[in-house]
Image (spheres, helix red, strand yellow):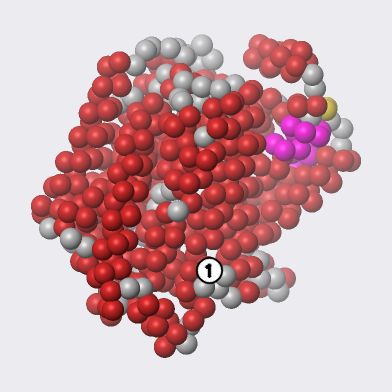
Amino acid sequence: MNGLIISVLIYEFLVIGGIGFYLSREAKKGKDSFLLSGRDLPVFAVGVTLALTVLGSAHIFGLMETAWHLGAVSMWFSFAHVILIAVVCLGTGRWVRRLNVSTVPELIEMLYGPKIRIITACIMAPTIFGLLTMETQAIGIAFASMTGWSIQKGAIIGGIIGVFYVVLAGMKEIAWINLINTVVMYLGMIIAAIYLAKALPGQNWDYVSEYYVNEGQPWMTNIFGTPDLMFTFSLGVILSVVFAQGISQMTLQTAMSAKSERTVKKSLWIAAIVNGVFGVFAVCIGLAAKALPEFHALGPKLAGATLIVELLPNWVVVWLLASFLGALLSTFAMTAITPATIFVKDLYVKIYEPEASDEKQTRLARIVIIVLSILAIVVAMANPPIVSAITWLFAWLIPVFWIVIIGLFWKRSTIAATVTLSVCWIVNLLWSFTSLPGVLGVRLENAHVIFILSIVLGFTLSAFTKGERGLFRKNRYEMDLEKRTSAMK
């Protein structure tokens, strides 16, 4: 086991250290070179970075854990991310690149003014930090499965490595390391699937299906599960993933770093394929782990990862877990750099030092990344359920998506946007921490409620309050003039 962990760590340090050091030496000093790669990322770098940004803890150990409870219907979490990637590459990602913004709150200011920019930044950054704690926990699980350490100890080691994934050269470092990790991950996944099928009783996956039939749960191996699960879980994750991550800084910072709007659009097929297939593999691992008695006894947190370690040849385990860890570290890096970007651009520079140099912004971003990573390690010690925690966090960003859509294509009413955001955020809290759902007798997830409320409030209030034409309803001259005026303020 010591040889296993040493091999994985050598791979990670060679890739991260080698590429990070090289890029930090070769990087040209310029505007946003650390946070946005100087806006020069090509199609392949954008595609794989977008794919791995949203392929983290939930896709790997989170889906193994969720499949234990819900079965194959868990795959809809992965399918939702394919829809998300289409929305980003064909919609929101292209729009933020076209407008040349550095953060989503900056886009909000273009639509609704500086005050609502600050409010949005103060919500979006903590939300992404919440996701960072989930990624830290998943990295801890990866190390626990390889070493027998506690998840907490693994989270500490993983968090330290995750910091180096991003602090040397920033966004460019993340993108180019992702290219290597993507190739390694998919080759490893194909080989692992072949070996796992041979390692199962009967040397195929029939044993797993028979187990759930014998348990009286044949729906566990059906991607449509039960009607109740399709409505509560599948629809819930589609709404929360697509309409939260579709406007999150975590997802859109990659698009902001692309060479052009066309680059974002062309990256669709790379990102969708790289991301979409992975969830199927993770769910199958989770189902198999529960079906085998020796892994069933470990429980949903560790069973899937331990199955991989125990049933595969050592060289395959090293390969697969190194690539898993690479994917987790990629998401860790993005969930660390994006709240740091919001803090630097939307809070520090906007409020305190508008003329801050790029070098100073980079130094501050590195400090924030380190501080957030330390805090994430501390929070991750509680081991909250990964997928359910993530879907709750996503609900905070759903109303941001809809006020952006309304502000770009229809009407910009600051009053309507402010009220919509405030009411949705209050309801999200009440829905989670009070008995309100039971009092109303409604069985809806947070995402269902906030999705409906965002649309109803956003469009109704916009219709009955004064506002300007949507930004994309203006001609190019009006947009340029308005952007220059906003910048002067």
> Horizontal and vertical percent for residue 382?
36, 59
Return the x and y of residue 103 as percentages of the image width and height: 56, 29
- What range of the chain is rendered magenta? 404-419
Q: Quadrant of residue 202?
A: bottom left
Q: Of helix, strand and loop, which one carries label 1?
A: loop
Q: Magenta includes 137?
A: no
As displayed, is residue 28 above or below residue 370? above
Find residue 177 and report its image quarter: top left
The outermost residue toward the right is: 464
Q: Determine which residue is flagged by label 1.
A: 223
| Res. 126 in view | no
Q: Quadrant of the C terminus?
A: top right
Q: What is the chief secondary structure element of the magenta stretch?
A: helix
- Report the residue at 48% width, 29% height from top: 43
**Image quarter for residue 150?**
bottom left
- In front here: 441 or 388? 388
- The residue sitting at 77% across, 33% down in the picture is 409
Residue at the spot 33% in from the left edge and 24% down from the top edge: 169
Residue 371 in the image, given as x and y percentages of width and height: 35, 36
Q: Foreground: 410 or 446?
A: 410
Q: Quadrant of the N terminus?
A: bottom left
Magenta stretch contains residue 411: yes
Q: Residue at x 48, y 51 (%)?
A: 276
Q: Looking at the image, which residue sits at the far left?
A: 3
Where residue 473 appears, as percent x and y from the top left, is: 80, 27
Q: Nearer the viewer, residue 75 or 305?
A: 75
Give the amino acid at mark 1.
Ile
Residue 258 higher or lower than 444, as above or below? above
Against 172, residue 278 (above or below) is: below
Q: Can I make out residue 164 in this image?
A: yes
Total numbered labels: 1
